[in-house]
Image: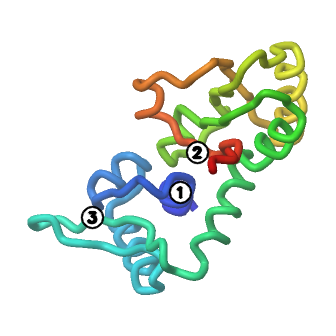
Amino acid sequence: MKLLLRFFLNHNLSGYLQGLSKELNENTNSIRVELNRLEQAGILSSELEGRRKLYRVNEQHPLTENLTNIVRKVTGVDALIDRVVGRLPGLEQVWICGKLAQGLQSEQIDCVLVGEELDQAFIEELCHRVEELTGKTVNAQVSAEILSEQRDQCLLVWAQETDEK
């Protein structure tokens, strides 16, 4: 499950066997076995970089979207989006930061809500509802825009569609 979280919460992440073993605090052999299974199933793809194999999500696999949805449900990201997005006027983007953005399990959901004139008290109420639903602590930061240093460490999980013509 840790490998699925690592790869399917943030498709931009990739990893080597040794790094994944350290990051997930798991035995190298068990990580190798699971990586091989996921690669044989076509869920992950790999490429050699020197003598090391780099693994990443196979975006073309028919189950990629389903696995991403399952991981979002398990981590509580979908509950955050469902509870906040439709109820918060002026919201433009939702970013997940911290451990979840790195594809790691966490008992808290760190997020940045980007928009103009967002109601902080209402956001706290919505976050409390998400906490009750998921059993995870929600730390929401409100901002008019996301900073470039945050952008590098966070994952965009929702953006308002724009009508550009």
Q: Residue under label 3, please give it.
A: 54
Q: Quadrant of residue 136?
A: top right
Which residue is located at x 37 percent, y 75 percent? 45
**Disc marking residue 140:** none
Horizontal side, residue 105 vs residue 122: left or right:
left
Mark 2 crowdedness (10 Å alpha carbons): few <14, some 14-19, many ≥20: some
Q: How far from the left and from the top, in percent, is residue 64?
A: 57, 72
Q: Quadrant of residue 65?
A: bottom right
Compared to residue 152, the image places residue 159 above or below, namely below
**Disc marking residue 2:** 1
Considering depth in this image, is 113 or 132 the residue closer to the camera?
113
Spatial distance from mark 1 to mark 2, Cα to Cα?
A: 7 Å
| Among the two numbered marks 1 and 2 on one chain, the one whose residue lies closer to the N terminus | 1
Residue found at the very far bottom of the displayed protein: 40
Q: How far from the left and from the top, in percent, is residue 69?
A: 69, 62
Considering depth in this image, is 122 or 40 the residue closer to the camera?
122
Mark 1 crowdedness (10 Å alpha carbons): few <14, some 14-19, many ≥20: some
Which residue is located at x 68 percent, y 19 percent? 142
Callout 2, which amino acid? Gln
Spatial distance from mark 2 to mark 3, Cα to Cα?
A: 21 Å
Q: Residue under label 2, please give it.
A: 105
Which residue is located at x 51 percent, y 52 percent? 10
Q: Are marks 1 and 2 in contact (CB under 8 Å)?
A: yes
| Among the two numbered marks 3 and 1 on one chain, the one whose residue lies closer to the N terminus | 1
Spatial distance from mark 3 to mark 1, Cα to Cα?
A: 17 Å
Q: How many marks?
A: 3
Compared to residue 61, the image places residue 153 above or below, namely above
Q: Are marks 2 and 3 in contact (CB under 8 Å)?
A: no
Compared to residue 19, the image places residue 35 above or below, namely below
Compared to residue 110, the image places residue 16 above or below, namely below
Q: Tag 3's secondary structure?
A: strand
Callout 3, which amino acid? Leu
